Image (spheres, rainbow, N blue to C red):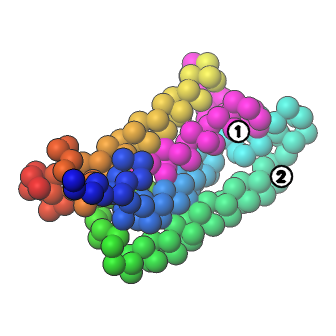
Amino acid sequence: MTEQPATWLGLDADAKPLVVAGLALGVGIGGFFDGIVFHQLLQFHHMLSSHPDASVATNLRLNVVADGLFHLGTYTFTIIGLVLFSRAWRFRPVPKSGRTLFGAVIMGWGVFNLVEGVVNHHLLEIHHVWPAGPGPIVLWDVAFLLWGTVFLVGGYLTIRTDSAATPAGGTDAVATDGSGSE
């Protein structure tokens, strides 16, 4: 009887360090995108702009400080992801696959959107995606969650179609060189 390779979340267990690094990087990058694009460039909201206490919600100085602390958190996830990536890349059994790393980063971004969306938009209600936008507020908050779900699933499927991260004998993987066959 042939011994089956070790797996983790349906992936080759050797890919785990690279996937974990990509997840952390994705959380950081997703947070940076949210903060830079939605908070700063488009100015749809700030971290506390829908806080139940109007004196908090309208205090721009406090909101900018909260945005800065938010960015500090995303920076921390990015640094952790880079350290984990550096360590994973040097560990011999870890596949050297850009496709797996890319899929994991997209998954991490999806995780960021889902956690941030559920916690800040729905549970704490300290801000919403686009409160002044067209349509109901919940429409934009749900769209943000759907975006996170698409990124989470799409990132996982990207990894699953990479032969470098798929356990031997998988039929849904493509070669990492893009040739389409193992």
Q: Is residue 38 magenta?
A: no
**Is residue 134 rendered to the left or right of residue 96?**
right
- Write the start and end of the magenta stretch as one range: 106-135
**Is residue 75 rendered to the left or right of residue 155?**
right
Mark 2 in CB contact with mark 1 (< 8 angstroms): no
Marks 2 and 1, the one that precedes in the sequence:
2
Q: Amino acid at mark 1?
A: Asn
Pair 2/1: label in front = 1
Q: Residue drawn at (54%, 33%), measured in percent from left and top?
A: 145
x%, y% of residue 130? 61, 32
Q: Is residue 93 above or below residue 178?
A: below
x%, y% of residue 69? 74, 59
Question: Which residue matches tag 2?
Answer: 62
**Is residue 131 rendered to the left or right of residue 14?**
right
Q: Amino acid at mark 2?
A: Leu
Q: Residues within 10 Å of mark 2 (few under 14, many from 20)?
A: some
- Secondary structure, mark 2, is helix
- Secondary structure, mark 1, is helix
Q: Quadrant of residue 45?
A: top right
**Chief secondary structure of the magenta portion:** helix
Q: Quadrant of residue 2?
A: bottom left
Residue 168 at least partly seen: no
Q: Residue drawn at (85%, 46%), measured in percent from left and top?
A: 59
Question: Which residue matches tag 1?
Answer: 120
x%, y% of residue 81? 52, 67
Q: Is residue 28 above or below residue 118?
A: below
